[in-house]
Image (cartoon, grey):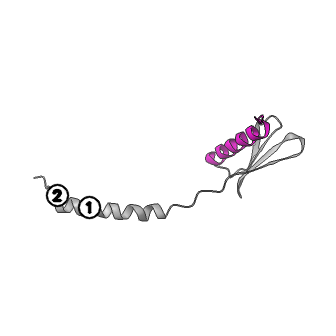
């Protein structure tokens, strides 16, 4: 025998979920600050993504070292930050 839920039960469940969603959204952490890019001697560049993640690039922009604690997302953020930095540094003003 299959039980069916009443319209009132479904309405109550939908309202409960709707009220719970804002509470879940509020528990998410704030977005991380943008990575900091700085030039090093010899044309090298360093991108600091977090206190635990620093990524270094050679003079050609190829990543050659990173902190052991960097996540894949942090390395991707460092790559994107370096790309933006290089585009801004070498773009021709119009």
Residue 49 drawn above or below residue 43: below
Q: Is residue 87 magenta?
A: yes
Q: Residues within 10 Å of mark 1 (few under 14, many from 20)?
A: few
Q: Residue furthest right?
A: 42
Q: The C terminus is located in which quarter?
A: top right
Q: Residue furthest front?
A: 94
Q: Which mark is residue 5?
A: 2
Spatial CA distance of label 1 from label 2 is: 10 Å
Q: Which residues are magenta?
A: 72-94
Circle 1 is placed at which residue position? 13
Tell me what residue is drawn at x 30 percent, y 64 percent. Answer: 16
Tell me what residue is drawn at x 65 percent, y 46 percent. Answer: 77
Asked whether disc 1 touches disc 2, contact meaning CB atoms under 8 Å apart, the reply is yes
Rendered location of residue 55, percent (x, y): 74, 47
Tell me what residue is drawn at x 65 percent, y 48 percent. Answer: 74
Q: Total of numbered circles in the picture?
A: 2
Tell me what residue is drawn at x 14 percent, y 55 percent. Answer: 4
């Amino acid at each position: 025998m299959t039980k069916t839920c009443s319209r009132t039960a479904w309405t109550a469940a939908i309202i409960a979920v709707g009220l719970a969603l804002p509470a879940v959204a509020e528990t998410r952490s704030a977005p991380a600050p943008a990575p900091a890019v700085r030039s090093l001697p010899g044309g090298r560049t360093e991108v600091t993504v977090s206190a635990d993640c620093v990524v270094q690039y050679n003079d050609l922009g190829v990543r050659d070292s990173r902190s052991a604690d960097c996540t894949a997302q942090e390395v991707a953020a460092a790559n994107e930050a370096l790309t933006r930095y290089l585009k801004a540094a070498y773009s021709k003003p119009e």
